Structures are given as structure tokens and as C-alpha cells.
Amino acid sequence: MIDREGATWVAGHRGLVGRALVRRLEADGFTDLPLRDRDQLDLRREDEVERFFEAVRPAYVFLAAARVGGILANVTRPGEFIHDNLRIQVNLIEAARRYGVKKLLFLGSSCIYPKYAEQPIREDALLTGPLEPTNRAYAVAKIAGLEMCRAYRAQYGCRFISLMPTNLYGPGDTFDEASGHVVPSLMRRFHEARRGRSESVAVWGSGRPRREFLHVDDLADAALHAMDHYDGEEVLNVGSGNEVTIAELARRIAAVVGFDGRIEFDPSKPDGPPRKLLDVARMTALGWTASMPLDEGLRQTYDWYRNQVASGGSGASIRPSA
């Protein structure tokens, strides 16, 4: 069990995952949660990270900071994705080693696995085949982060662990179509179509790929569970264990939003991998399983979107990176 009263730092606390982690930690009795906004601490700058660790000396670190986005963002800005993520990871993992952090949890992404990995994807599928081209730069950066954690454990004895979550969604997500993931992007599109009384909504791809979705509060719960109960070098997949086609996802989001027009798929746009379902046997063996049903999670997320983004509330400017 990690110390609830020791300084615990959530790197990237303004992002989707970081906000959920802070909520979860506060609910679980953590009292020392040093938080820094980007104008106070640019995680891409080694000197600023150094000063932070020197001043705060965190005992535990959740490394949730990242440059993230959907297919469009990954395709159009791969340089930013690999540059920013590599710099953030190198700076934080090295500082955690030098300042004696007791335990660090690195959050990766299921895109680290080969495009045509056997389904459901086991952790040992890593580096066994070519990656999905549309997000290869981001995936390579995340692979480098988890390998850095393994290497530091092997050479320096650092207690650094890694979780690989599936596709995430939930309150605090980024609803910008140019950089958002599939759930918030579709949610915004259907919302605007309903308000504008549009007869149809266009959706990228054929609608046939199958995806697994995990509510971000489930991931936060899984991360704390792993920090308390896991201390191995092997990656841990985190997912819901359920999958839907993109077409079914679109229909469910349309129903939540109240859009009753046509959904038109555009097969000229990229689909990404045909299927991506994680094998979560290791997390299950540790005593953790996801609890949020997809439809309930979508309703909760849409309520947040209407209150915080569509209405011009405080969540409108939230960005996905650290």
C-alpha cells in the first residue's frame, strides 16, 4: 500500500486521465497532492522538472501527462506527438530516479501493440509486428517510455510500473474534432447536428472496426489498485473486456444525444486497426475489473459536455496534454 499522506504527484492533472486520478486519490484519502499548471511547469523542459522535484520531493508519481489525440491529430502532427511525449517521459522518469521516488506508474496506450495482433491482445504481443501507421509516432514514444521504466528497474532497482489502457472516454475529455478521440468527437458532432436540425452526420471510416472503451474513472481506480498491489516489470493491460463496432458506438452516442437523423459512414477515410480488444487477465488476477457500463458512461460524459463545454463552462478550454 502506498502512503496516503506522502506527497503524490499526478503529472498531467489537467488532462482527461489526470483529472480522474486526482478525483480518485482525493476520495481515497490522499492529502498531499502538489499540482502545477502548464504555465507553472512545462514538463518538456528539463530544468523546470528538475526544480519541481528539488522543491517538492514527491514520494509517488502517476505519469499521466502526454500529448494525445485522435486519428486526425496523429496523422497531421506526428512530429509533435513523438517530440513532446519523449521529452516529457525522459524528463520525469529520470528525475524520479535521481530524487528517489518510491514508486512511479507510467500510463501508456494500447496503440503500442501491432496493428494485426492476435485478439484479445496479450501484453507479450508488444514488438511482435508492425504498428498502426496512423499513430505510429505516438506509439513509438509510449513504447520508449515503458522500456525506460523497465530499464531503470533492471539497472537501478526503481519501482516503476506500467499500465496500458484501452480507448478512454469520460468527463474532462477534449471535444475538439481536430484533436479529440472518437467518443468526444462523435458526441460533439451529434450534439451540433441535433441543435442545427441536420438530417445526417458523417462518420469517418466504414464503421466496421471493433473497439473497446473504458471510462476514465475506471482507469483511475485501476491505477491506484496497481500502485497498491503490483510491483512487477511486466506491462498490465487495462480495459473493460467488452467491444463494439464503431457503427454501434455511433448509434449509441446518437441515442444519448437525442439525434435521430441518418448516420453516414465515409469509407474513404482511415479505419485504423480492424479490431483492438485487450486481454485483461493480469489485472483480473490482481483483483480488479471495470465497473462502468458503456451506455451509463456515455450519458455521464454527455451531461458533462453539455454543462461544461457546449454551454461555455469551465471545461471548454481543457486540452489533452500536460
Image (cartoon, rainbow, N blue to C red):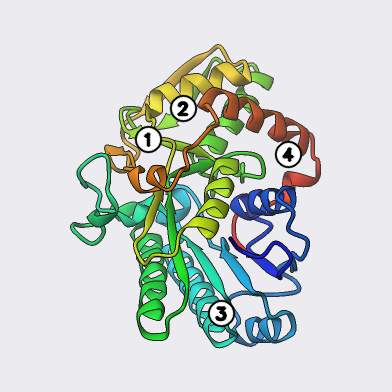
Q: CA distance from mark 3 to mark 2?
A: 45 Å
Q: Amino acid at mark 2?
A: Ala
Q: Residue 55: image x %, image y %?
A: 74, 84
Task: Give yes or no for contact between labels 3 and 2 (Cβ–Cβ under 8 Å).
Answer: no
Circle 1: element type: strand
Give the vertical position of 195 relative to 238 (above or below): above
Nearer the observer: mark 4 or 3; the answer is 3
Crowding at mark 2 (Cα within 10 Å: few <14, some 14-19, many 20+): few
Which of the marked residues, 1 or 2, is nearer the chain's N terminus? 2
Q: CA distance from mark 4 to mark 2?
A: 22 Å
Report the residue marked by disc 4: 309
Q: Which residue is pictured at 42% across the width and 73% down the height?
A: 149
Q: CA distance from mark 4 to mark 1?
A: 25 Å
Q: CA distance from mark 1 to mark 2?
A: 19 Å
Give me the disc on residue 78: none
Task: Give yes or no for contact between labels 4 and 1 (Cβ–Cβ under 8 Å).
Answer: no
Nearer the observer: mark 3 or 1; the answer is 3
Report the residue marked by disc 3: 96
Which of the marked residues, 3 or 1, is nearer the chain's N terminus? 3
Report the residue marked by disc 2: 202
Q: Quadrant of the N terminus?
A: bottom right
Along the horizontal axis of the image, is 18 left or right of 85? right
Q: CA distance from mark 4 to mark 3?
A: 35 Å
Q: Residue 136: image x %, image y %?
A: 33, 59
Nearer the observer: mark 4 or 2; the answer is 4
Q: Amino acid at mark 4?
A: Val
Q: Which residue is pictured at 45% across the width and 59% down the height?
A: 230
Q: Amino acid at mark 1?
A: Arg
Report the residue marked by disc 1: 211
Q: Residue 124: image x %, image y %?
A: 24, 56
Q: Residue 284: image x %, image y %?
A: 40, 42
Q: Residue furthest top?
A: 260
